[in-house]
Image (cartoon, rainbow, N blue to C red):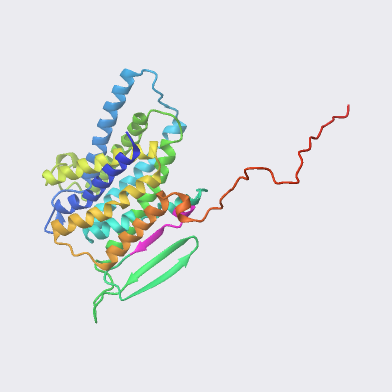
Amino acid sequence: MQWYLVAALLTVLTSSQGILTTLSQSEGRYLYDYATVPFLAEFFKLVVSGLLLWREHRTSPSVRMTTDWRTVRLYPIPSVIYLIHNNVQFATLTYVDTSTYQIMVDGNCSISCWNNYKSVKEEMHGARLFCIIPPDANWLQEFRTSPKELIIVKGCGEASCDSLFSAPIQGYLLGILSACLSALAGVYTEFLMKKNNDSFYWQNVQLYTFGVIFNMAWLLLDDFRSGFENGAWWQHLLNGYGITTWMVVLNLGSTGLLVSWLMKYADNIVKVYSTSMAMLLTMVLSIYLFSFKPTLQLFLGIIICMMSLHMYFAPPNMLVDLPTTIKAPHPPEGLKEVSIEQRTDS
């Protein structure tokens, strides 16, 4: 499968993730325990990866599966990061709308963690813009730090306003935390997936096995903190679940499988850009589903990400003037060819 097809599908799933999560709410709150969604998503990914590994092993018994503990012990780390990230994501969407969430998370800082690119277009991408965009701006303040740029759009567009932000500050802080966690997990997962030539499905099985274990531990911790008021977590696992909630689970699980594929056969930057493209689709769907009114700042954020996308994938000669090498058709007149004999003293 071509990487751009996987990236396009990931864009669709990512754009629908926040929308489905919002639709699963009732009167601004979740009727289900949202900590159970990442657990079921991890279990879904583990089952799918296990079946595909079994199928691969049947067709090719020589499939490579490293079981050395020094390698296996690295897999719990991204599982813990994704566990925290998934729960932060649900908490963030209780404070901000889906489009604001998408632009905060997808305009993430993973590039600042991945700064070893040497080609022209990759160096251009290294200067990608990171935007914090509160609504309706009266003025634009630009603060430059090398090699990144930080653009802050402030104001509310009215004579007076109660706040410079369209959502509680907790929502923006959680969104920034979610972006940082996503960047950290993405870079580390790519390192793991490309560390050796193990079977892709075997690597997934290791990732999702630890994911299931840590999510179960999280649910058990929640029960302990509540004094087992509602019983053990498996007794109320599916309470409040509806069709939309199951769609959230399948969406989250399918997104994770596509991301791991990109980490193995493409790179983290393709993943970041495919999810960044989801901003535009999220905005269009939010207008139709939630009567969302896009602001100038949202358009600015999308335009900046589109410019960054063009800068990364465009040929280098479209971005900078490269020197042209001209080869002379004939040797210049007046030059003679001289042969030199090299002697070695014995």
User: Is 124 included in the stretch rendered in magenta?
Assistant: yes
Horizontal side of residue 38 vs 188, given as left or right: left
Q: Quadrant of residue 176?
A: bottom left
Quadrant of the image containing the C terminus: top right
Q: Is residue 3 magenta?
A: no
Which residue is more in the foreground, 14 or 165? 14
Which quadrant: the N terminus? top left
* Residue at 22% across, 43% down: 251
The correct choice, above or below, for 108 with respect to 192 in the image is below
Extreme front residue here? 333
Residue sitting at x 29%, y 22%: 55
Examine the rendering and report whether any part of residue 231 can be seen: no
Q: Position of residue 2 (x, y in %)?
A: 33, 36
- Give the number of callouts: 0
- Pick the front one: 175 or 122: 122
Range covered by the magenta-colored residues: 123-132
**Residue 20, percent across and down?**
18, 50
Q: Identify the residue at image location x=15%, y=48%.
A: 32
- Horizontally, residue 338 falls left or right of residue 74, namely right
Q: Quadrant of residue 103?
A: bottom left
Instruction: Name the residue at the right extreme.
Output: 346
- Residue 330, horizontal then vertical, whole percent: 65, 42
Depth order, front residue of 254/3: 3
The residue nearer to you, when weighing 222 against 148, is 148
Furthest residue toward bottom = 159
In terms of image quadrants, where is residue 205?
A: top left
Tell me residue 169's x, y (percent).
Answer: 29, 66
Asked whether the viewer can see residue 113, the reply is yes
